[in-house]
Each structure stands twice: as structure tokens, then as C-alpha cells.
Image: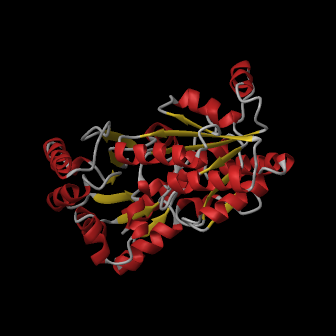
Amino acid sequence: MVNILYINPRFLDLLRKILEEDAGYSVSCVYTFHTKNFRDTILNTVRRYFNVFTNLWKIDFNKYDIVHIQDRYNLPLSLFKKMSSGKTKIVYTCHEGLWLSSNSIASVMKKSPTRMLEGISMINSDAVIALSHDLASRLMRIFPSLHKKIFVIPNGVDISFYKLIENPYVRTLRSKFANSEYVVLCVSRWGMEKGIDILIRAIYRVTVEYDIRNVVFILKLHGNDMHYRNFIINLIKKLKIRNVVILEGFWSPYRLRILYNIADLFVLPSRYDAFPMTLLEAMACGKPVIGPNYGGPKDMIMPGINGYTFKMGDEEELAKILVTSLKDKEKLKNMGKSSRKIAEEYFNWNIIAHKTLKVYEKILLE
């Protein structure tokens, strides 16, 4: 029996059943720190590494054939622990969109020196999983030695939970926007890399310059970047579009699923994003999607089939796509059906789990 340890796993419940029942693996997991309200400051980074050290040092790696790590903080110490265990294979899943904005080791060091520790650790891992093709290409450009050990495996989505639903609560919530023919939704977090300012300027062009008035934009944003949050609120006031923009905070997954269902169109304006789960969740709920032609969205969106892509950062192109989309409701419905089909065929967890199993089998044979 293969023993595998997940460190700070994401979506493990969805993978565990397949790993244990189909492959006969013994799956364990450990969480070395909490991410709630975490701010990426020097002091908090030191605290996080300290928590990792105190929790990870207790684990006997000799018990496991594979250790699969889901965050950069645990990777360096895990490799150090591997040196004493010998047989343990280290697999690392890279989620970090910041790599997409870096072209060289020098640019990585300038933006975040701790990323170099992550990069060196990836080179010494047995396998690296990148969530998108663009992320894999960028990592191989910066670290050429990764090309023999990197695999592109996206995250999956729970298609039994995120789905098209019709119930009284959905109809009641949608009726609040009865004066608007279209509801456009964005689910993201506060942060310059998420490009909310790009969307706000595009909304101004749509509603003022193109004079499209039959639409409301719901922006459900979370996070603790108060500086960027205040910047966005002031930008909305400055452009005088408060009447068409609704800002929402944290919603539970159950309420969020309702929000996806009342939308006619989902848009994500990120400057860089390794693999945005909200876009995939919207697809699973049968919604057409718009996102940048880079990173994770590029792998999820088939232009003209289930949505549209725009040049990253180009607010004018995004506005034109929104205007075109808001003129044909029937086409939006058809693209939404395609979104659901793509989510089922390419991003359900059964497929993702079996791709991951192939990586495990490959490194265990080496």
C-alpha cells in the first residue's frame, strides 16, 4: 500500500475517496498553519515559517512514500526532512500567480525574495504540478531544469455542488434586480493583481460611453487589502457609476452558489491568476465567462464557445466584449450550457484525481 501525506491540502475531501477506493492509497493530511486574515508582511512570513517548523518537524517522513505539499512555506523544510528519510518522494503544487508576472530570476528576487527559496525547492522536488499551461511555461523559462519534472494539472470543481439550480430563493434574489435585464457578476478579492480597477473602468465605458443602461454589476470581493479597497470605492464615486455597481463582502459557499445562479454573465479581470476557482465555479453553474487571455483563464475559456477572453489589462477591449455580450441573451444561455459541459468533461475531480495518480505512479517507479 502506498502511504501519502498531504500538507495543507486544498479540496482533499474531493480527492480522498478516489485515491483510497480506486488506487488503494492510504491518505493522511496535516495543516501547519491557518490562512485566515493572513497578510503577506515580513513579520507574518517569519511567523508562518516558525509555525511550519514547529509542526512539520514532528512528522516522521519515513512513514510515507509520497509527501504532497500545497504551499511554498512547507516546501523547503520538507525537502530537508526528505534528506533524512531517503525514500520519500516530494510533490509540490504551485498555485502562485505571481510567477506569471516574472520573466527572470532577477525579477522574482525584486518582487519577493522568498520566492527564490520556493524556486530552488521546486528544482529539488521529485515532481511539480502547475495549475495552468502558462504557469508551467513561465516556471520552465525561469528554471529550465524543471521541464523534466513539471506536469500541468488544474484544480477541479465539485460539479455536484456548483450547478444550475432553480428554487424560490434564486427567483426572489433575482427579482431584486428586476429593473436590470442583465446581471454581471465578479467574485474575487481586493488586490491590485486581481484587476478590479480594470473592470471598474470597463463598466464606466459600458454604461456611460456606450450608454448601456439595462445592466447591474455585482462585485463580491473579500480580503484585507484596505488600501486597494478604498481606491476602488473612490474610483467608483469618481466615475459616478454607483447606481450600477453593487459591492458585496464574504458569502458562504451556499449563498455564493445562489449568486452564481442569478447572474447572466461572469467576468474576471485579473492581471495575473494561476487558476481562478471562481471562474470555474461559475462555469459549473452554467454561466458564460469572460477573463484575460493568460494564465488559468486561458485554459478554461474557449472564445465564442463558453465565453470570451481579452488582452490582459485592456479595459477598452473588455468593455467592447461586455457590450457585445449584453446584446444577445440567447447566445449567453447557449455559452452557459457549453461552460457546464466543459466543467464536467475537463475539470471534474474524478478526471483531476486520475491525472494526479499518474504523476504519483511515475515518480514511484523512478
In percent of width and height, residue 88 lies at 26, 57
Could you tell me if residue 148 is visible in this image? no
Report the residue at 25% width, 53% height from top. Answer: 73
Which of the 4 image quadrants contains residue 28?
A: top left
Specify whether 215 is left or right of 10: right
Report the residue at 64% width, 64% height from top. Answer: 316
Specify whether 180 is left or right of 294: right
Q: How many marks?
A: 0
In percent of width and height, residue 283 lies at 66, 47
Task: Looking at the picture, tell me which residue is in the foreground, 243 or 296.
Answer: 243
Task: Looking at the picture, tell me which residue is in the foreground, 267 or 342.
Answer: 267
In percent of width and height, residue 210 lies at 74, 55
Could you tell me if residue 284 is visible in this image? yes
Task: Looking at the picture, tell me which residue is in the foreground, 134 or 109.
Answer: 109
Report the residue at 52% width, 64% height from top. Answer: 295
In percent of width and height, residue 187 lies at 55, 43
Report the residue at 26% width, 70% height from top. Answer: 110
For the C terminus, the image quarter is bottom left
In the image, is residue 361 above or below residue 19?
Answer: below
How was this image coloured?
Answer: secondary structure
